[in-house]
Each structure stands twice: as C-alpha cells, then as structure tokens.
Image (cartoon, grey):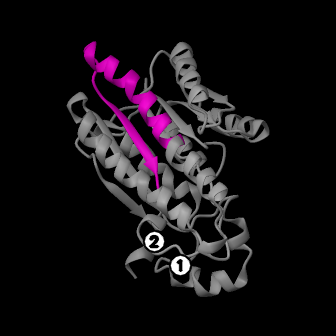
Amino acid sequence: MSGLFDLSGQVGLVTGGNGGIGLGMAEGMARQGADVVIWGRNADKNAAAKERLEKTGQRVATAQIDVSDEAAVKEGIANILSEFGRLDTAIANAGMSSSQRSVFDITTEDFNRVIQVNINGVFFTLREAARHMIDRAKNGDPGGALVGIASTAAIHGAARNEHYAASKGGVVTMCRAMAVEFARHKITVNSICPGWVRSEMSQPAQDNDKFNEKVISRVPTGGWADPEDFSAIAAYLSSRAASFHTGDTIVIDGAYTIF
C-alpha cells in the first residue's frame, strides 16, 4: 500500500470504537493499513468489533476502559505502548447523552456525569496520547494526530440537552487549544461534529416517527448518516495528507446545520 492515505506501520486508538461512528472510523484506518486499538466498556461488543476489524488483515486489540477514569486511561495508553510500541492517532470518540424534558430537569448529577465522560474522558485520552507523541518527537520522530468527536449540538441549539451541548462545545475549544500547543511537535489536533447518525445511542430517535418527520426530513442530503460515512475522515486525519490540517472543526452532517 502506498500513497497519501497509507497508514502502514501506524497504530490508531479509537475510544468508544466498538460500535457506531467509532467503529466506522476504526475500520477506515484499518483499511488503510493501520493497526487499531478499540476501547469500550462492553466486552461482547469489543469482541464483535475485533472480529470485524481483523478481516482487514491488521492487528487489532481491545480493552475495557472507562475514559472518565484518569488512572484507567493512563494504564490503557501504557498498555498500547507496551504491546504496539507506538501510538500515531488517538480518536476520543467515547461519549454519552442524557436528554431530558427540560433544562430544569437536568440534575447536578446528570450534568456532572455527562461532563465527566464527554469532557474529562476526551481530555484524559488526548493528553496521555500527546505525552507519548511529544516524547517521540523529542527523539526525532515527530508527528501524530489527535481527534475529538464533538457534535452539531456544539453549533445549534440543543434544547433539553444543555449538558450534552456544553460538553461538545468544550471538545471543540479544547481541541483548538491543543492544536496550538502541540503544533511545534507536528501533532495535529482537530474536532469532528457529526450530525444525525444511525447508532445505538440514537436508536430511540430513529424509532420515533415524529422525530424523523420533523427533524430528519430537514437533512438536505436525506435521512440518517451511517457510521461508515466517517471512515474516510479518520483515515485522512491520520495520514500525512493532513499534516498541515490542524485546529479545525469538521462538520459532517449532510448540510443540516446550514439549512
């Protein structure tokens, strides 16, 4: 394999990579020659994802990691380095949502739980991956890609989901700050804002006829996105083709937010 998007010899991590967007991105990297590590809390889903990704011919490893647990993240990164020897891309995709009837129904516990996973988890993951990438750069091997998965909730008004919106807005600005700090080490940092995507998390909305009529009908490209629609962006951001593409917020939503 050769070319701008060749990831041969690289190792990529995707948190929450055992399903949905995460699995689509992991598969995109594996198809371009990267070995892949999947973090997810469900052992059965991890095993199924591993079996699927191994069909690409690449090495695949999984681990049950709660990204909101700082110690677990540190140990997880250490284990990747022990097994694979390096980490070239870290995609912080693990997240959660907890939609309510009103902002007044969001308890402090609800708010903190979403922030702990969606902000702290992204911060821990990208920070610890960056430590290794910077050490590598100091030893003459610069480069690396960090990606935070945000949401179009960071852009438009996500009523009854203010805690989720706050967390995803935080991912966008945190990635911009990291992009500036890590640029001298040739590490790129970008965020992605997906729109409405078929996944386990969005299943209740997919099954809601009223939601499909009122919301999904407004997606200019028509309908829901599929996780596979995110495979190419993961491969691109991990590749040398994106070596000067940093500090960006990439919206993949079928033009929903601009319509």
Element carrying mark 2: loop
Circles 1 and 2 in contact, beta carbons < 8 Å: yes
Q: Quadrant of the C terminus?
A: bottom left
Q: In which quarter of the view is residue 228 placed?
A: bottom right
Q: Is residue 58 visible?
A: no
How far from the left and from the top, in percent, is residue 98? 66, 62
Segment tinted magenta in the rendering: 121-150
How far from the left and from the top, in percent, is residue 195? 50, 67
Name the residue: 57% across, 82% down: 215
Look at the picture and state if 176 lies above or below 76. below
Q: Which residue is mark 1?
A: 222
Q: Amino acid at mark 1?
A: Gly
User: Mark 1 or mark 2, which has the lower sequence index?
Assistant: 1
Name the residue: 25% across, 36% down: 181
Q: Please indicate whether residue 64 sits to the left or right of residue 67 in the image.
A: right
Q: Which mark is residue 254?
A: 2
Look at the picture and state if 68 lies above or below 231. above
Q: CA distance from mark 1 to mark 2?
A: 8 Å
Classify 10 Å Cα crowding around label 2: few (below 14), some (14-19), many (20 and above). Answer: some
How far from the left and from the top, in percent, is residue 212? 64, 81
